[in-house]
Amino acid sequence: MGTDRLTKVCANLGKLSDAELRLQAPGLMRSIADELSAASSELDRYLRDKKQFRRLIVLGTLESGSRGKGRESFRRAIGCRSSLRSSR
């Protein structure tokens, strides 16, 4: 989710001495801010995708009462190419 790069940056910070940290502070702050932003964007995308998937599942469940047609529309919505008839 983007946190692996943030973890790596933090691990590298732990290896620096106090003097090195003071010298590199502006660049390090920018780097940390960039990594936090990237991790935040990845989390937002993950949550948006998860919410959309849940919506599709609910939609498929609600429509499934109409003799399997809901399952077909659900499969089309998530990009599944196999038809319901071929699985029977």
Image (tube, rainbow, N blue to C red):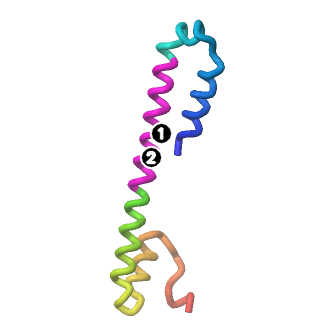
Asked if residue 55 lies left or right of residue 29, the reply is left
17 or 52, nearer to the observer: 17
Outermost right residue: 15
Q: Real-space Cα distance between discs 1 and 2? A: 6 Å
Q: Residues within 10 Å of mark 1 (few under 14, many from 20)?
A: some
Up-down relation of residue 51 to residue 31 (above or below): below
85 or 10, nearer to the observer: 10
What residue is shown with label 1?
39
Residue depicted at 56% across the width and 12% down the height: 21
Would you say residue 49 sits in the magenta stretch? no
Residue depicted at 39% across the width and 93% down the height: 67
Asked if residue 15 lies left or right of residue 43, the reply is right
Up-down relation of residue 19 to residue 85 (above or below): above
Q: Residues within 10 Å of mark 2 (few under 14, many from 20)?
A: some
Up-down relation of residue 63 to residue 56 (above or below): below
The x and y percentages for residue 40 are 43, 40
Disc 1 marks a residue whose amino acid type is Ala
The x and y percentages for residue 5 are 57, 35
What range of the chain is rendered magenta?
A: 28-48
Disc 1 + disc 2, Cβ < 8 Å: yes
What residue is shown with label 2?
43
Disc 2 marks a residue whose amino acid type is Leu
Residue 55 location, quadrant = bottom left
Would you say residue 46 sits in the magenta stretch? yes
Asked if residue 44 lies left or right of residue 27, the reply is left
